[in-house]
């Protein structure tokens, strides 16, 4: 166990204390930090515990109500939820007043990346994903038809990428006459862009889309607030064969990036949390770097510099070269032994608030050159897994107290409220109202939200299979209701209304067809699994004017709460045995494929092949829905315990096979007795009793056990 040092009434893990005192704190004395932290814990840790108790009390009442009532009666259910305080009154009309928000969150619509901050290389990739090569994103993925080249440059494939990109420019930044495909050159004349074609000269149909240029000839366009950079280099591999000498088209891609301390990481002890905080600190200082071997050479990755160019009148412009970063702290549930109070573990969410905000002060205090995160003096925190307005109000109080301790102006910290729990969805307007002076983000998260949907209605009956959830009545009401609540609260112009992750990182052709639905739904951001996906998703925001969509949605009828509160149950419908077996195999494989990497290797987010070897980007949210579904089916007799055991063993063999090429992988079969396999089993068989169906308690215990085994 990590050694601890005394700091007043606190006992702090020595590595964490060193990091905070020697590197994190700037402008705040260690004594003031620790005394403020101790007072904060004494005041707010009991409140945190009471909020968790209320979750359990409400769930117990809902369980009992479901067990004594059949069939399901929507009107009676709604009245019951109101009576017990689960449903709260709608607040009077209000508008958020969040101030000093960077335009990337407040005004410009574009992609968002989510990445584990615990991995420095991934964290840097996400921060640097503000700009991406459209040619590379097309060339190296299935966005273009045909096989992806594995050897040297394929000119035919390159020509496909060029043709796709030129056609895209014709759609979103058309010339007054002619096509970008026939371009022979670009020139500037009296502050306007001139396009040279075989038949003569033309300009942009909308001259205001010309945003600037570089002295060497590169041209910038602006479409719906996003920059598009046309690089000119007739000596390059691509440019030498291009009539206009265009070597690449770079897109402003991930405007924002969530550096995740939560679901995407496996941080279970003081050692892990210290690494999480050290990486976030280095991002805020601007000096995070990571060296790695590639092609026999050592390469070092750092944060990208800002982008400099000239506007149409020739005046210098400095534009951000990096995504604006938000830290996703953990929720209210878990406690940590990294900081003990009177010998007892303390809420991990309070520790995250103190340390991540203190680290971000390095960015706030920058006055000269160098990479800035927030140019408006804000700290951005995403707070997940909150249940209802009281818990959001608690977060508001928590971060306000942190600001006082650190000497920051009120509402320096801007909060993102993740709408991924049923009680939050049902009371979303009141949740936003509870944090209206600092709310900068709401979003939907299908997987966690589905896990909570199943857990809340656990005793009502068997839930429908996972594949049917996307067609359930509650889901469309959830997705629409989130946008409705955000627009009614005036979040447009103050923050982001977001949608969830594209889970298939290798299926870019499908993403290009499907994910345009997010901006069309009124979301001004949506999650992407990689920088490449962010670049391709950026093309959707060129095609869709999200602000215009939002204006149109403000007058529609609000999503029905009755639909939102309709549980996705089979309601007497029988599933054939083969459908049950398929779901068992699919869910068990998904659980095992994720858990074995989480527990044995500490990988919190990764591409996990499904039962058909399709790679899916998974984190704990995926695990929550799969484990809760099987726990529900066991409870209601849709499957037997021995069938689940057989499926787990059968799928362990499959997962072992899928990971055979990983030298760090430890097979689960034939012993089936390692911490990972046992954790996967517990997630199902103990799923009913897990708080809100969360996976963290069991996963953390298993990961700690695996680390002890490795150390022994």
Image: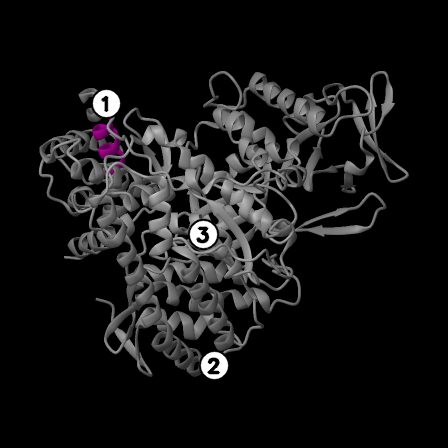
Residue at 50% across / 42% down in the picture?
A: 481
Name the residue carrying label 3: 427
Q: What's the distance in space between the residues labelled 2 and 3, CA to CA?
A: 40 Å
Residue at 38% across / 67% down in the picture?
A: 351
How far across and how far down the image is residue 305, in percent? 62, 52
Image quadrant assignment for residue 178: top right
How far across and how far down the image is residue 431, in percent? 48, 56
Q: Which mark is residue 238?
A: none
Question: Over which residues does the magenta segment extend?
Answer: 582-591
Earlier in the chain: of badge 1 and badge 2, it is 2
Look at the image and name its color scheme: one colour
**Secondary structure under the numbered disc 2 in the rendered image:** loop
Image quadrant assignment for residue 37: bottom left
Q: Judge left or right: residue 387 versus residue 602.
A: right
Q: Main secondary structure of the magenta part?
A: helix
Instruction: Decide whether residue 588 is among the magenta residues.
Output: yes
Q: Which mark is residue 579?
A: 1
Q: Judge left or right: residue 611 versus residue 494.
A: left
Residue at 75% across / 18% down in the picture?
A: 182
Q: How many marks?
A: 3
């Amino acid at each position: 166990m990590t050694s601890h040092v005394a700091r007043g009434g606190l006992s702090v893990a020595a590595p964490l204390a060193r990091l905070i005192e020697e590197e994190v704190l700037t402008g705040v004395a260690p004594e003031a930090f620790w005394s403020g932290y101790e007072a904060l814990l004494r005041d707010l840790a009991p409140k945190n515990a009471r909020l968790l108790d209320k979750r359990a009390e409400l769930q117990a009442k809902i369980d009992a109500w479901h067990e004594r009532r059949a069939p399901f009666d929507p009107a009676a259910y709604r009245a019951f939820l109101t009576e017990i305080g689960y449903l709260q009154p709608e607040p009077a009309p209000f508008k958020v007043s969040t101030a000093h928000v960077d335009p990337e969150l407040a005004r410009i619509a574009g992609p968002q990346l989510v990445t584990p901050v615990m991995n420095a290389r991934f964290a840097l990739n996400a921060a640097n994903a503000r700009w991406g090569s459209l040619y590379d994103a097309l060339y190296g993925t299935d966005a273009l038809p045909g096989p992806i080249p594995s050897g040297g440059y394929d000119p035919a494939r390159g020509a496909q990428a060029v043709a796709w990109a030129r056609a895209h420019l014709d759609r979103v930044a058309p010339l007054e006459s002619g096509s970008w495909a026939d371009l022979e050159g670009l020139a500037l004349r009296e502050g306007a862009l001139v396009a040279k074609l075989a038949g003569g000269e033309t300009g942009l149909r909308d001259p205001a889309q010309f945003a600037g240029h570089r002295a060497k000839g590169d041209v910038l366009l602006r479409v719906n607030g996003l920059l598009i950079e046309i690089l000119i280099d007739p000596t390059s591999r691509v440019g030498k064969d291009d009539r206009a000498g265009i070597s690449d088209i770079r897109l402003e891609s991930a405007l924002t990036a969530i550096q995740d301390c939560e679901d995407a990481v496996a941080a279970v002890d003081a050692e892990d949390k210290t690494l999480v905080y050290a990486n976030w600190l280095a991002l805020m200082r601007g000096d995070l770097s990571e060296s790695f071997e590639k092609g026999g050479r050592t390469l070092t990755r750092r944060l990208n510099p800002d982008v400099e160019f000239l506007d149409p009148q020739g005046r210098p412009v400095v534009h951000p070269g990096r995504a604006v970063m938000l830290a996703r702290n953990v929720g209210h549930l878990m406690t940590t032994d990294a900081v003990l109070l009177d010998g007892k573990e303390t809420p991990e969410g309070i520790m995250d608030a103190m340390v991540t905000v203190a680290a971000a002060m390095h960015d706030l205090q920058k006055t000269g050159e160098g990479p800035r995160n927030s140019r408006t003096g804000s700290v951005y925190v995403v707070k997940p897994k909150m249940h209802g307005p009281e818990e959001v109000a608690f977060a508001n109080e928590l971060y306000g107290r942190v600001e006082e301790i650190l000497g920051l102006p009120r509402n320096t910290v801007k909060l993102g409220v993740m709408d991924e729990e049923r009680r939050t969805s049902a009371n979303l307007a009141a949740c936003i109202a509870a944090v209206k002076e600092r709310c900068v983000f709401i979003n939907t998260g299908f997987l966690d939200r589905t896990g909570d949907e199943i857990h809340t209605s656990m005793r009502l009956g068997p839930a429908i299979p996972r594949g049917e959830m996307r067609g359930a009545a509650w889901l469309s009401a959830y997705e629409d209701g989130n946008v409705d609540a955000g627009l009614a609260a005036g979040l447009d112009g103050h923050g982001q209304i977001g949608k969830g992750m594209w889970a298939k990182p290798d299926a870019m052709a499908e993403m290009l067809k499907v994910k345009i639905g997010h901006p069309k739904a009124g979301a001004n951001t949506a999650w992407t699994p990689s920088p490449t996906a962010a670049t391709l998703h950026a093309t959707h925001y060129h095609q869709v004017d999200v602000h215009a969509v939002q204006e149109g949605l403000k007058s529609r009828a609000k999503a029905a709460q009755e639909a939102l509160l309709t549980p996705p149950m089979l309601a007497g419908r029988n599933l054939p045995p083969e459908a049950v077996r398929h779901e068992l195999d699919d869910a068990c494989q998904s659980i095992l494929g994720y858990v074995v990497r989480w527990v044995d290797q500490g990988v919190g987010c990764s591409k996990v092949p499904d039962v058909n070897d399709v790679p899916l980007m998974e984190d704990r949210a995926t695990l929550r829905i799969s484990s809760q579904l099987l726990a529900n089916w066991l409870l209601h007799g849709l499957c037997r315990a021995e069938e689940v055991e057989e499926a787990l063993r059968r799928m362990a063999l499959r997962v072992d096979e899928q990971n055979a090429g990983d030298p760090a992988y430890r097979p689960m079969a034939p012993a089936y007795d390692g911490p990972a396999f046992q954790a996967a089993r517990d997630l199902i068989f103990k799923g009913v009793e897990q708080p809100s169906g969360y996976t963290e308690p069991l996963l953390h215990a298993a990961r700690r056990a695996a680390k002890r085994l490795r150390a022994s």
